Every structure is written in structure tokens, then in C-alpha cells.
Image (cartoon, helix red, strand yellow):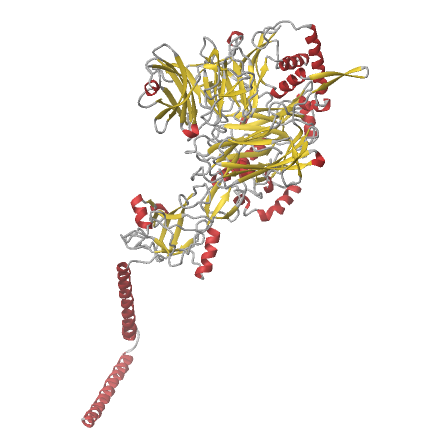
Amino acid sequence: MCGPAMFPAGPRWPGVRVLQMLWALLAVLLASRRLWAIKDFDECTWQVVLNEFKRVGENGASDRFFEQELVDTVGNLFQMLVDSPIDPREKYLGFPYYLKINYSCEEKHSEDLVRMGHLTGLKPVVLVTFQSPVNFYRWKIEQLQIQMEAAPFRSKEPCMAEEVCGMSWYTPMPIKNGSVVMHVDVSSNGLGTFIPDKRFQVNINGFLKRNQDNNIQFTVGNELFDLMPWYFVGISSRPLWHTVDQSPVLILGGIPNEKYVLMTDTSFKDFSLVESWVRVLASECIKMLCPVYFHSNGSEYIMALTTGKHEGFVHFGTIRDGQVSFEMLPRKWSVCEQIGVTTCSIIWSDYIAGEYTLLLLVESEYENASKRFQVVSYNTASDDLELFYRIPEFIPEARGLEFLMILGTESYTDTVMAPKGISCNPYNHLIFIWGNFLLQSSDKENFIYLADFPKELSIKYMARSFRGAVAIVTETEEIWYLLEGSYQVYRLFPSKGWKVHISLQLMQQSSLYASNETMLTLFYEDSKLYQLVYLMNNQKGQLVKRLMPVEQLLIYQQHTSHYDLDREGGYLMLSFTNFCPFAVMRLRSLPSPQRYTRQERYRARPPRVLERSGFHNENSLAIYQGLIYYLLWLHSVYDKPYADPVHDPTWRWWEKKKQDQDYYFFLASNWRSAGGVFIEMDSYEKIYNLKSAYELPERIFLDKGTEYSFAIFLSAQSHSFRTMADLGTVFQLHSQVDVGVVLADPGCIEASVKQEVLINRNSVLFSITLKDKKVCYDQGISGHHLMKTSMMVNVVGSSGLCFQETHLGPRMQGNLMVPVFIGCPPGKRLAFDITYTREYSRLKNKHYFDCVQVDPEMPCFFFRDIFYPFFLIQDLVTGDSGSFQGSYVLLVVGGGPTLDTLKDYNKDEIYRFNSPLDKTNSLIWTTRTKRTTKDSAFHVMSHESPGIEWLCLENAPCYDNVPQGIFAPEFFFKVLVSNRGVDTSTYCNYQLTFLLHIHGLPLSPKRALFILTVSVSVFVGLVIFYIAFCLLWPLMVKGCMMIRWKINDIIASESYYSYASISGISSMQSLRRSRMGSVFSSRMTEDRAEPKEAVERQLMT
């Protein structure tokens, strides 16, 4: 019944051993701590598929994730939302996909279950984790999550029921620039049916595109839809190569005699068989591809080993933004030439990204036809090559020991060492050299031979979790297991534990196991070991991914190997030997995780629908899409130089609407909200106070001098304390339960352990503190070029022997491994504290003059006032925001009189405009601060500096600026602030560039004199004109009056003559006489006046 791949045949066991096996099986069933009630928890599971925007509500719809463009289908809906907290004038977009969520239980109809869950208050909670992008030169490095609550939605299928027949829950599937790998964790809100949490891989498949017929196809080959059994049955397994936590599409090749590869973007939840025609290095004969599991310097890597003309070289491939480029290394001479042999072959290559080092496993041939193996280290940056380690020719004689230190003085067997590969863990620096042996080293100098692995076997490949666990696959498809830091190697398959496990699975008729199966690959995912196997049942094949139950197998193995039958009275009693040194292990005093994991999280709930059934419609789901988009957009644009008064990306969203919160609630409670939805402002927020989940964080980031502390509580199996007396002291209690802390880089980090014996509880409390030593890192940009190291905590004697029973199965205890990153943590930034700067300037200068045209986003500062800049260190993860207390260099690196005329200065100009050593009369500013950089080129400032005085000397760009209007000249300075090389308080290289608006700049003396002359001339001219006008005005008035009188007289005369024809002759005569009388009287008056004037002249003389 057993196929050769997973069930090797063996001799029949004797009857005694059969009886022992039955007793052992009974012991396993009785000794299991899992309750039958708890077993029911595993019967229900979440189901998640992807739906396009237009296919929401369709039964059976499932789409592939490859569209990345946002859709503009929700803007019109937001225009209708008047009297709501949002601003309809803003731009709201949608995502191309939704997550459709259901759940199923064994032997129960899914639609009934979902409907029942909805009626009992069940709501799925979806947590989407965006994996940080690789290319940090293009995208921001951050750890981002968004937590959403799924919205219930009726199926569009015809239904006879009044309310609902079929339904599902939906959430938007958000997209973030630069992230192509997303983890979707689905959990319950705690109401209704208990459903265990489940994680799904929802990744963007960049190998898909739409053709001219709007059909989806692969860009690397043709998809095959028939999985023939001969593709998989009986073939040898091969490693699954990928970049850890970064590869959106997993590719498994190696199908014999075919160019087919298995491709999946859901971690083998579903997959495609593709006939691939992509080929690289077409002119080379490639004998092997070697994986690089970790990215570095913004790129991913792959290595190709060739044969023929380029034997002894490595083709080193760099992958960035989908573009692949190869370089042949070493750059000058081949490896063979540099190690001094005529013939050699590179068997394997491993790249240590953080150290820019290639470890090459080289087989050398000498003149006497002998072959030796050695490990060569090559530095890709300096092009230096050196011998790393010379592998012994024969396997050492262990003489019953579990391990043996290779010193060169030990005895050896006759078995020749045949190395096949090399692997390094970048966190704990543990190096394995493997073949028909297993060597390990933690210091790159001394190697240890692990004797538990039999020399009769040969290792084909290794799968590493990089969190402390290693799985080994041999050429005969055996599976072995090893915990890093220990020396015991356990065989998982074939083993007694596997026979017990497979028997139980077949008894339960599990669909994940069959009597005829072939393992295709073995790999780790989220620190759990998985198999990809091809099952054959009744001539039908099936490809499944299943969990490799390592803990359960080790438990079965213990129980079947170590048990006793003791007679008590008339009965035989089973008893087992528990090799675990403790009974209970708990973690205590764990700090809030976000400060160390740097995980940012947002929470967004769907808008409330004003419908009594609570079901959403397409419009409300689209509005939910737009709100999620706008929340992530606010997050992306929050990294601006000017700090907001409130340190939170969502503050500006509700800044002007928060005061009307009660009004919006009143509208919703009276069913009057526009659009039939109610948007709660408190439902869209950033979470800063996540609590610890009673386990060590996934990773720890340490800044300069940062500490991380926690405690381990261990309850002993029995009385495990003893008294010891030192000379001159009283007796002290000592526990036989010990804890060891192993640091990968003890020169960079240190750990302290304090033990507290709790004798009344038969327990021990170990307080552990991990601290950075401030010596192994210089300064770097936030999240860039971090140093990888690790901390391992081991309970002595617990490796592979201690387990904790949970409702999800047993979990291994006693071995903890946490990656540690030393450097500037992600999510920390420097911001210009404009609020405090303006307040402090007003206090010190006794006034504050803003620009005439006030810009609230960029306040102005007066040129003649002393400028006192202040800055904030803002933690985007924890929400902390405090004054920057370190030192910094401030430089003006650009500027212009207007925003449209800004110019970046070159290095020479930056020096002349900012350096106190400048002799060209070009300084823009100065300060009374005496401290300078080491070369005295620039001032070093701090929050206690006396301030900045603006100069704008003759050769400065802000000198003699022409005013734009009647107001004083203005200037925009582009200011760079950096603490690089002058601040020893942090590993962070803070760099902030912002614009500073200065008004009231003075004019040059020449231009000022010219303007004064012109102004005085104009003023004097106006005064003269005014005086002349005042003097001439009476004469002008008199002249005007005379002219007016004459004009009136002429008019009167003309009027008189116009009536002359009507008057009689007598009238003419009387008129003539009157005129003659008037003339005579006027002459008489003149004659009398002449003697009077003559008399007056005589008197004056």
C-alpha cells in the first residue's frame, strides 16, 4: 500500500514490538492533552477570495491579483455626501479588488453558516500587512498594517426569501506603492461561532497581463491546465528558492524532461503550471542556480554557476524593479588562479548580503589526481579573495559523542567527506557545510561536526526558517530536523512518530494524506514547515500544501520510545518519562511591541448603512473603498517638513469637522444622513497602543543605547532547588532550571540575566535585558542598511523535548530566537517645529511680523529679527513627538525670490553662503555659536543655540533683491538640516529639507540711494507743484470769472439785439440817450480823479 516516496518498505516487526507499538499508540491517544471539546475549534475555517470591483456579490467569483491601477469610480458618490464629515472637494479613488470572506465547517452548508454568523453578530476582522518594499531608493521603508471590519453584503443571485438567502462579507483590498506582498489575517470579533485565526497570502502577480482579447495570460510562457501524473509521481524533491518575505510569486521548477514550472502567488493555495521560455545568460552553459534568500542595498540577487570557458567564475545577478543584470565575479582572475590550482570547480555559492561576501564551496584537483574541498571568501566590494576554511578529507570519528570540535588532532574514519552545499543565517551568523556530513560554525573560524547525522546518508538540500529551525532533505527523501544552537539532529521521516501520525490521519480519512504520495518540496513559511506533495487516490492526482507537524512527530517519537508498564495491584499502568526540565513556561513583563517592531497600524470600519437589516449595497462598499484610499493617502503625504500642531496623519482629515460631530450623529440617528450612510470620524484612526501578545516580537529594532527587557517564568517539574553555601555566607537557594542567552554579536549588544527563585511556587523568574553597546554602527537613514544580528534564549536541556498544548496543536517551548536590527529604526523623522519656533521668536524679539499675504502652511519671518529654529523628533509608530535635543548642521542649499525661481546651489556656493571661513563676502547668515565641525567649515547648532542672524552680504544671492511691488523684498531659502557626524545621541542620520520664507530684506546702498533720490525728486516736484498751484489758483479763478463775465456779456448783447426789431424807435432813442449820459458821467468821474492822484504824488515826493 505504501508508495516509495513517503512510505519506504521495511522488515516485519516481531510480535513484541508490535505489542509495544500498540501500547505506544494507546499511550499517545490517552496522554494527549487536547480536549475533545477543543478539537471542535479546528472544524471551522475562514475562506477568502479576491473579487474585482464589478463582480461583487456574484457567487463563485474569484479573480487573480495583477491590476495595480486605482479606479475612479467612487468620486461621484462622495459628491452626494453633503452634511457629512468628509470634504466632497477632495479626490477619492477606489481599489480594483475586494476581499470576499466566508467560513465553512465540516459537514455543514456554508451559506447557512454565514447567515447564522451574521444573525449572531459575527463580523470578520481583516488585518492587511504590507511587506516593506525592497528598493528603498524608490519607496519608503516602513512596516504598515491596516485593520478593517468586513461589511455584510447580499448575494446578487435570485432568492425567494424576504431578507436574504446567500451573503458574504467584503472589505476593500488596499494597494500600497512599492509593496507587492501582502499578508491577510482574518479573525473573529468574538461573537458567534468560534473560528481560529487564519493567514492568507494575497500577492500581486507581475507575470500576468491582459491580451488583446481581454483575457489574462502569463508573460513568461503558456499556462497548462492539465496536470499529468507523470509530471510529479516518483520524481525527486527540490528546494523552493525565493527571497524571504519578499517574493510575491513562488516558482518551483525541476520537472524532469520538461520546461514546466509551478507558479503561485498565494503560497500554493492555488497555482499554475506554465511552460516557461525565459532564459538568461544564453551564451553560458549553466550547471546550477544558487539562491540568495535575503535582499540588500535595495536589490534582490541570484547566482549562476557555469561550466566550460568560465569555470571558476560566478555570474552574480542583481534584480531591481524587475530588471536583471549579471556581473562575472571575481572581476580579474578566476577562483582557480587565485587559490593556486590549475583545475577547480565551484560547487555552491552563498551570499552574505550585509557583509558583501560570497562564500564559495570549491573542489580543487591537484597534480596527484587528489581532490580537496575548501571554502573561499570573496568580497564583492573590494574584489579580495581569501581562503575561508579547508574541509577535512575524511569524516571525523565521534566515538559516541553528539558533536565534535574540529581541531585537527581528532581521529578520522575511512569515509570521504563529499560536501554539496553551504548556507549562512545572516541573523545568528551560523554557517552550515553539508553533504554526507554536517558541519556548523558560529564564528566563521571554528567548526563543529554534528555526529547525530549518519554518514551513510547525503544531504540534498536544506530548508531554513532563519528563526532557529532547520529542515534537512536527503538524497533518499528522508527528512531531518535541527534546532540552531543545539547539537541534536532528529529524523522526522521515516520514523516511529511518522508511522503513528500517518496511521491516525488515514483513520480520520484526512484529505491531505494518501497511501501513494510524492513530496515535491519542503519549505518554511511564517516559521512553520510545509510540504508540497502530490497525492494519488483512485488514479486521480492532487497537489496539496500541508503542514509538517514537527512538534507532534517529536511528541509521538518520545512517547513511543520512552514509556514503562508498571503493575499497580492487578493492573498494568502506563507511565512516561518527561524529559522537559520545566512544567510551565510563560513570558512576562513584555513591553508594548510597537516601539521595537516598528509596526504602524491603522483602523478603519465601514460606514454605517441606514438600513434596518444592516446589509451594505454597492454604493456603501464603494464609499468604504474611497475612505480606505484617503486614509492611506493621508499616511503617504504626512512625511512633510513642517510639523502639524497634532502629531497624527488623520488630524487634518477631521480638523474642521470634529466640532460638528454631534450634529452628524443627530442626522444619522434620525435617518437623515445623505447617501444613506453615516461616516464616523472615530472609526478612522491610527493605533499607537497595541498590547503584547504574550510572546516575543517578530523582530526588534535597537537605536543607540536602546534596551529591551522581558522576563521568563519557569515552573519546575518537581523539587529542583538545592542549597549551596559560599565561604563566610549563609546558605542560598539555587535552581536546577537554567536559562542561557546566546548573542550573535556580543561585541555589539549585551544581555544581562537576573534570577529570582520563587520557592513557594516551585518556580524561577529570569529577568533578561538586551542592550545596544553603541559601538557597531555609525549613522544611517531611517530603516536603511541596518545591521542584522540576533538573540537566542534557551532553557538548558529543552531543545526538542518541551511542548505546550494549545487548541491549535502542540507548540515547541524552551527555544526562543529573535532577529535584532541595529541602526536607525524605520518610522523616525526630523520635522521643523513651526509652532514653537514662531512662539519663541515672538517671545525673544518682543514681536512677530508675518507677511502681508499670510500663508498658514508657511509662515514668514522678519529679516531683522533673530531666527530661533526648533525641530521635533517624531515617531510615526508610537505617536511620540518631542524636541530634538541633539546637535545639527544648518545649511542654506537653495533659494529664490519666488517659489517659481528657486535654485539649488552647488557645493562651492553652499560653502561660500554658509561657512564662517568664507572670505568672499557671500554669507547669508551667521550665529554666535562657537562650535563648528571638525574642519571648521560650518557651525554646529543645537536647541540651545543663540539663534541665527540674517546677513545677505554683497555676493549672497539674497543681496539687493528687487522688491515685487510696494512692499519690502522677500526671499525663499531652501534649508538643509542634518545631524550627520555631529550628533552622538542616535544612530539616525536625520536629514530635513524645508523652505523658509523671509520678508523685509534690506536694499543695497546704491539701490537704496537711487530709490531715495527718485523718491525725494518726486516728492519735491509734488511740493513745488502744490505751491505753484496754490499761488496761481486765485489768478486762475479771477481769470476764469472775467472770461465767464465777458461770455455772459456777449450773450446778453446778442439777446438785446435779437429783440431790437420788436421795440419802437422811441425806445432806440431813449436807449441812445441813456448810453450817452452814461459815457458823459464816466468821463466826468475820470476828470475828477486825475487832480486827486496828482496831489497825492506831490505829497509823497
Q: Nearer the viewer, residue 7 or 368?
A: 368
- In the image, taking residue 903 as reference, residue 491 lies left or right, namely right
Q: Position of residue 36 (x, y in %)?
A: 72, 22
Which residue, as the protein is rendered here, is positioned at the far front?
727
**Residue 368 percent location from the top left of the image:** 35, 10
Q: Is residue 55 above or below residue 398?
A: below
- Relative to residue 262, is residue 57 drawn left or right? right
Name the image quarter holding the N terminus.
top right
Which residue in the rendered view is the most extreme toward the right? Answer: 570
Number of numbered labels in the structure image: 0
x 45%, y 41%: residue? 988
Residue 484 is drawn in which quadrant?
A: top right
When the figure is inspected, residue 741 is found, relative to residue 314, above or below; the finding is below
Q: Nearer the viewer, residue 229 or 450?
A: 450
Image x and y of residue 520, in percent? 53, 13
Which residue is nearer to you in this view: 355 or 583?
Answer: 583
621 on left or right of 955: right
x then y, percent, for residue 735:
65, 33
Q: Is residue 1057 visible?
A: no
Which quadrant of the rendered structure holds the C terminus? bottom left
Q: Is residue 944 visible?
A: yes
